[in-house]
Image (spheres, rainbow, N blue to C red):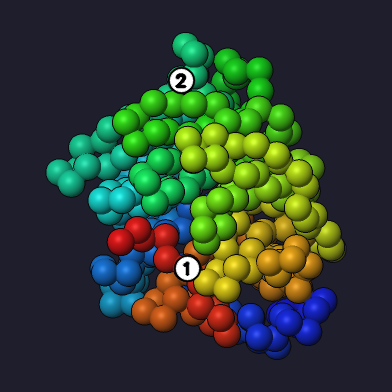
Amino acid sequence: MSVDIRDPRMAAVVGGAVRFDKIAGDCLFTEGPLWHPGGRYLLFSDMPGDHLRRWSEAEGVTTFRKPCNQSNGLAWDREGRLLACEHATSRVTRTEADGTITVLASHHEGRELNSPNDLVVKRDGAIYFSDPTYGRAEYYGRPRPTELDFRGVFRIAPDGGLRLLADDFAQPNGLCFSADERRLFVNDTDRQHIRVFDVAADGSLSGGRVWAETRGEGPGAPDGMKMDSAGNLYCCGPGGIHVFAPDAACLGVIRVPEYAANFCWGDDDRKSLFVTASTSVYRIRLAAPGTSQFLD
């Protein structure tokens, strides 16, 4: 069964079953999927392979950047420039229109960041990112001692200033805003839960209560996380991708053939979910459209 239905509302969001179309394979560990609606292509990282790839219906899988500093989470900024979390360098970078790389964040109070993992851009241009230690581990990054004594969530202001927002995580990972951007959801891989913060006018966070837990059988833990156009929150977890209603009820789980790390919506109607799952990338079709990661 491709869908584990826990609430009848799941059918209206995902449908009763989904078909997995493998669009890429033979990778080491895929992450960071990002759809470009204008170019109609998908970017995704193979972190251990230090390879950022591009897929399109017309061209299939090609190389976008190699080496890529073992990039993980990707996003577009307000001007359509590529933002990347780099495991190998502990940096958040931006690719300019001419292809040059600008470093947006690398240190906090003189100490190197752990390994920026995932990021999301607010409408005002501020960048929020998680900073666990996974990029300092063998295979997924470059082994080296940490300099920070915490694992937190940071904000890069539109003027470039870096600010620590929360430091009480075991391993912060995926994050996403509510539609009105008044709340920021951040999951904690080690603790298997999703927290929700209130976002103040100055971009700071408060609260941080546990909003939901990812429970179930099978391999997986909270990782990639995004919200669809109806306010349903999708989060990787045991067995695949867990879907939560706005009231935090778990509607069900999309059971992915391989360990799922991340996902994004794409295609013209945003009803295709592109899933980076271990050695492969899959595309599935859903009933409800997602949101765009491209900021108009």
Element at badge 2? strand
- Is residue 283 something one can see in this rendering? no
Label ID, residue 107: 2
Q: Residue at x 31, y 51 (%)?
A: 78
Q: Residue at x 26, y 69 (%)?
A: 38
At label 2, the amino acid type is His
Q: Residue furthest top?
A: 110
Label ID, residue 216: none
Of residues 2 and 246, the one nearer the viewer is 246
Neighbourhood count class around disc 2 (C-alpha, 10 Å): few under 14, some 14–19, many 20 upward: some
Neighbourhood count class around disc 1 (C-alpha, 10 Å): few under 14, some 14–19, many 20 upward: some
Q: Residue furthest left?
A: 98
Total labels: the figure holds: 2
Q: Residue at x 64, y 64 (%)?
A: 233
In the picture shown, does residue 156 fall above or below 108?
Answer: below
Image location (x, y in percent) of residue 28: 54, 52
Quadrant holding the N terminus: bottom right
In the picture shown, does residue 276 fall above or below 269?
Answer: above
**Front position among marks 2 and 1:** 1
Q: Which residue is mark 1?
A: 291
Image location (x, y in percent) of residue 111: 51, 14
> Sequence order check: which comes first, mark 2 or mark 1?
2
Image location (x, y in percent) of residue 104: 35, 31
Q: Residue at x 34, y 36 (%)?
A: 158
